[in-house]
Amino acid sequence: MQNLGESHWWRAAPLVAGFVVNVLSVDTGLFGMVPIVLWVVLARSWRTGIAVGMLLVVLLAWFVLPRRMELPGRWVPSALEVYWLYPVIAAVVITVGLLVDRRLLVGVLWLPAMVVPGLAIAVFLDLDASMPRDEGVVSAASGLEVAEGDGHCGSGHGANCARQLTATGDRAGEVVRAGLTSGGFIHRPPLPTDERMCRRTGLVLVHEVCAELRDTSPTSVRVLWYVN
């Protein structure tokens, strides 16, 4: 009878766990699976393979699930950091695993092949950015009638684009403000005509989203949001 190390069935554990996390993520596609798949291919020892593989799954979960749950804070990785910071940290973890397995030379070519495309994707997404995502603003109006207006952009790329919605319903203004507060938005100095709330995420580079609110009637509020 083959033992656990000889059968290679242990390789399925990080793959399945990583796939589940990836399915629950917001918008990473299959990119989050790349370090896990690479490690499963490179690993030899089942003990090191399981330990490093599950550590990579935990790392992936940290980078994608807090945004999926719309959690706030500087400990929450931003969307772009999934493509450049996540593979860099994953490469360090894999390097340690290869050192333990005494196979570091194998990773000399493979690890850059994982990190460089991630950096390229992050640069492309940053330059090609257009409208901001929902960013926790749309969900803040949950339970209300929401009508999204036309977005608009100034000069330059996505940092100058904004989206707008109007939420209507009983105590609409209070509901949206409470939803934004629970999503980590905090009050900032108001503008001349509008109230402003902002939320920051990002481990290395700050990703700040601001929402400007204006009550248009006792049962209606207009919200304009953008990446600051």
Image: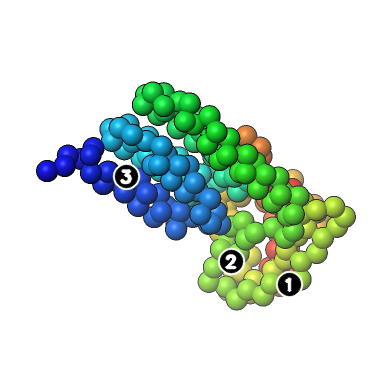
Q: Position of residue 140 (x, y in %)?
A: 57, 62
Q: Which mark is residue 11?
A: 3
Q: Which amino acid does label 1 sit on?
A: Gly
Q: Which of 150 and 183 is in front in this view?
A: 150
Query: What secondary structure is found at the residue carrying circle 2?
Result: loop
Residue positioned 53% across, 57% down in the render? 29
State the CA–CA distance, disc 3 to disc 1.
48 Å
- Label total for image: 3
Q: Nearer the viewer, mark 2 or mark 1?
A: 1
Task: Categorize mark 2 by other alpha carbons within 10 Å: few (<14), some (14-19), many (20+).
Answer: many
Q: Where is residue 166 in the image (x, y as percent from the top left)?
A: 69, 71
State the CA–CA distance, disc 2 to disc 1.
14 Å
Residue positioned 82% across, 60% down in the render? 153
Q: Which of marks 3 and 1 is in front?
A: 3
Q: Which of 111 and 19 is in front in this view?
A: 111
Vertical side of 101 occupied by 77: above or below: below
Residue identified by numbered label 2: 141
Q: Where is residue 41 in the image (x, y as percent from the top left)?
A: 40, 42
Q: In this view, does 34 lie to the left or right of 149?
A: left
For the residues bearing labels 2 and 1, Cβ distance under 8 angstroms: no
State the CA–CA distance, disc 3 to disc 2.
43 Å
Quadrant (top left/top right/bottom left/bottom right) for the N terminus: top left
Between disc 3 and disc 1, whose residue precedes?
Answer: 3
Q: Is residue 220 visible?
A: no
Q: Is residue 8 left or right of residue 98?
A: left
Q: Which amino acid does label 3 sit on?
A: Arg
Vertical side of 192 occupied by 75: above or below: above
Residue positioned 47% across, 30% down in the render? 106
Q: Which mark is residue 149?
A: 1
Q: In which quarter of the image is residue 189?
A: top right
Between disc 3 and disc 2, whose residue precedes?
Answer: 3
